[in-house]
Image: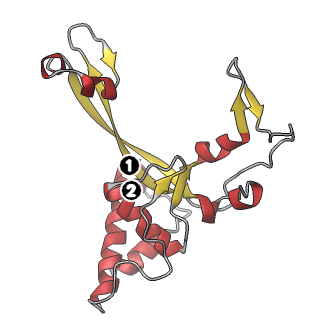
Amino acid sequence: MSVMNTYKKTSKPSTKKSNVASSESAQERALNLFAEMMIEKIESIQQDWKKPWFTEGVSTSLPKNMSGREYNGMNSMMLMLHAEKEGFKLPVWATFDRITGLNYVKDKQGAKQDARDGEGNKLPQVSVNKGAKSFPVFITTFTCVNPETKERIKYDDYKRLSEEERAKYNVYPKLQTYNVFNVEGQTNIKEARPE
């Protein structure tokens, strides 16, 4: 069995859950998917070593989130491979919460209100397309704790400290997995909010 067939099989979840699959963490499943995608890509270009990594017509721009921040490292490469495989032209990605969050604004008290245009009309609802499958990305967050006082500070604040002040904190990395959708190919945002 070739790896290409393996990737195709695992990209469609089966109805039976095995004990192995259910015991894997989200990070393990994502890393396995990434490995399968890389092997499939390498196998596909082995037959024509002059072939570029990405085919023409697929955006080779770096993938971005809806705020415009570019994904980097492994996330960037995997989102580009996934976009090529699925035929997505626009390299913009967002989580389910970010997409549905476009339907609301918060008032001064923090309560959600329907999003409205300049004339006070309710904006059309933005949603993820039915049947759309998310794709995993990783983000590493850092917890900075002073072991004596148990005080926690944000990592950005920690980076601004002097070397002497930094020595007072322990920094703990945490790898988190988020699932994202391609904004153009997996949501109705173009129809609902053409602007």
For label 2, the SS is: helix
* Closer to viewer: mark 2 or mark 1: 1
Left or right: 191 with respect to 32? right
- Tell me: residue 117, above or below residue 71: above
* Image quadrant in which you'd find residue 176: top left
List the single residue furthest toward the front. Answer: 118
Residue at horizontal 37%, vertical 56%?
75
- Tell me: residue 60, above or below residue 128: below
Asked whether the residues under the numbered discs 2 and 1 touch, taking CB atoms below 8 Å apart as contact, a structural biologist would say: yes
Which amino acid does the dot numbered 1 rest on? Answer: Phe
Residue at horizontal 60%, vertical 58%?
183
Q: Position of residue 117 (x, y in %)?
A: 80, 42
Which amino acid does the dot numbered 2 rest on? Answer: Ala
Left or right: 156 with respect to 80? left
Question: Label 2: which residue?
Answer: 30
Residue at horizontal 61%, vertical 66%?
185
